[in-house]
Image (tube, helix red, strand yellow):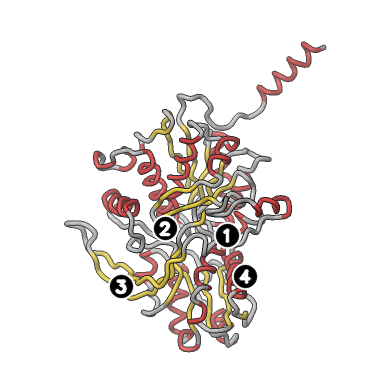
């Protein structure tokens, strides 16, 4: 009977799916779930470019020897194992399809391509799907979230396999709340009706109420495919708020910015917002003097790592790094740091303890993975828009129109740290160490 039971167990193990690469001489496969062709395609390109540069920088490859970044990527190794990047595009012009498409891309990466680590996505709803699939109860793989900024990824939907080297919208709101006395006492939020928009609206309610401001009306949610914002902007005017907080993602922001000006919103109240990618801002610039939160802008950090990223981004892509290039670069650095510490073991059992509490220097300065919820703490910026300027990035290149900003405030990682909002099952983790504590 004992022999029979052992044979049955062996047969069962043979039928179990085995995902990821385990042999020491096999490549470590990093699967990237992103949008390259849909409504957030501009952010997906920034994500992939930044991730490649971050992996290259952390690996120490001499990129000056290469004209093509993908040729340089073939030289990336860690702990004696080559690193392979597998990019899957889930993009669609229909935002409602993103989550299902991202889930399909994730399954393909894991079951067919044997990805060891997952990275993604620009869309928060899609990121929530990838988070579920990579959880300990499902594929049990490390998930490096971002640029998706919905707070719940490191909050109410948290699992221990999820880390985020990008900021979340609570950090956006906390940064702007430091300047709230310049805007007024009451506010209204107009947000895109997605997981990102709803999460961000809640984040501003939390941060602004803590700073002493009052919501003049409930958050105004706008369908993501809206092109005529008149009825929603009229609700903003009817609120009689001192300021309007606009939360948007994607190309629809151009129409929103134009109609905000045309309908006289800025004559009645202050605009509080975040900045967008360079091309979108150049196409529909805000009024000069607008104060906003910005995720990243290539002229703001002053350090050697940012200089390296800017120089090599221009060399490989003939453009400057943009909004989400920076945190994707930092994601690549963090992955390489974890794999170095685990001697090439990419699985959560080894990587989670290696990454919890990790501190490293990146494009914005010091980054820190908070042990409790795995949310990165890093410097944040509030800027003032000063106009659009024609600049030439490199000798012989055509000039481009580039937004210009002046720095209003740099808020360090601790000062902009969001509250720990883990669900009840993980609530005790909120007592774990914070930055600099013993």
As drawn, is 166 to the left or to the right of 400? right
Residue 361 drawn above or below residue 221 = above
Q: Position of residue 234 (x, y in %)?
A: 56, 84
Q: Mark 1 points at which residue?
A: 150
| Label located before the other in sequence (4 or 1) | 1
Q: Name the residue under label 2.
A: 42
Residue 40 drawn above or below residue 219 = above
| Label located before the other in sequence (3 or 4) | 4
Q: How far apart, in angstroms, are the residues tagged by discs 4 and 1?
A: 14 Å
Q: 9 or 304: nearer the eye?
A: 304
As drawn, is 332 to the left or to the right of 425? left
Q: Quadrant of residue 108?
A: top right
| Label located before the other in sequence (3 or 1) | 1
Q: How far apart, in angstroms, are the residues tagged by discs 2 and 3?
A: 20 Å
Secondary structure at badge 2 equals helix
What residue sits 51% from the left and 24% below the top?
23
What residue sits 60% from the left and 35% below the top?
349
Neighbours of disc 3 within 10 Å: few (<14), some (14-19), many (20+): some
- Circle on res. 388: 3
């Amino acid at each position: 009977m004992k022999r029979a039971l052992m044979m049955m167990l062996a047969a069962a193990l043979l039928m179990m799916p085995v995902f990821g690469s385990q042999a020491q001489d096999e490549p470590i496969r990093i699967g990237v779930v992103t949008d390259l062709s849909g409504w957030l395609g501009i952010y997906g390109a920034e994500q992939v470019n930044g991730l490649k540069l971050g992996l290259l920088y952390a690996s120490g490859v001499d990129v000056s020897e290469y004209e093509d970044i993908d040729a340089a990527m073939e030289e990336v190794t860690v702990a004696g194992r080559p690193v392979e990047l597998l990019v899957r595009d889930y993009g669609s012009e229909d935002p409602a399809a993103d989550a299902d498409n991202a889930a399909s891309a994730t399954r393909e990466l894991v079951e067919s391509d044997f990805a060891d680590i997952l990275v993604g996505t620009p869309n928060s709803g899609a990121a929530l799907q990838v988070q579920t699939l990579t959880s300990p109860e499902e594929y049990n793989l490390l998930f490096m979230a971002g640029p998706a900024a919905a707070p719940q990824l490191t909050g109410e939907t948290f699992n221990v396999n999820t880390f985020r080297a990008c900021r979340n919208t609570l950090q956006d709101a906390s940064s702007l709340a430091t300047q709230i006395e310049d805007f007024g006492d009451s506010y209204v939020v107009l947000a895109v009706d997605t997981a990102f928009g709803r999460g961000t609206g809640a984040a501003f309610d939390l941060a602004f109420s803590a700073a002493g401001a009052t919501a003049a009306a409930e958050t105004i949610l706008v369908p993501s495919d809206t092109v005529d914002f008149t009825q929603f902007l009229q609700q903003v005017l009817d609120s009689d708020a001192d300021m309007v907080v606009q939360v948007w993602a994607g190309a629809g922001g151009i129409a929103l910015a134009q109609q905000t000006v045309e309908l006289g919103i800025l004559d009645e109240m202050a605009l509080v917002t975040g900045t967008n990618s360079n091309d979108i801002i150049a196409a529909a610039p805000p009024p000069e003097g607008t104060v906003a939160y910005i995720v990243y802008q290539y002229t703001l950090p002053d350090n050697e790592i940012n200089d390296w990223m800017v120089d090599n981004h221009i060399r490989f892509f003939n453009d400057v790094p943009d909004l989400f290039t920076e945190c994707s670069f930092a994601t690549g650095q963090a992955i390489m740091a974890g794999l170095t510490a685990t001697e090439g073991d990419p699985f959560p059992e080894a990587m989670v303890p290696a990454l919890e509490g990790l501190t490293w220097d990146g494009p914005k300065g010091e980054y820190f993975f908070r042990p409790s919820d795995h949310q990165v703490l890093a410097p944040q910026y509030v800027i003032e828009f000063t106009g659009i300027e024609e600049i030439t990035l490199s000798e012989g290149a055509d000039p481009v129109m580039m937004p210009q900003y002046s720095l209003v405030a740099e808020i360090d990682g601790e000062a902009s740290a969001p509250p720990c909002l883990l669900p009840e099952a993980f609530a005790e983790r909120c007592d774990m160490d914070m930055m600099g504590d013993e």
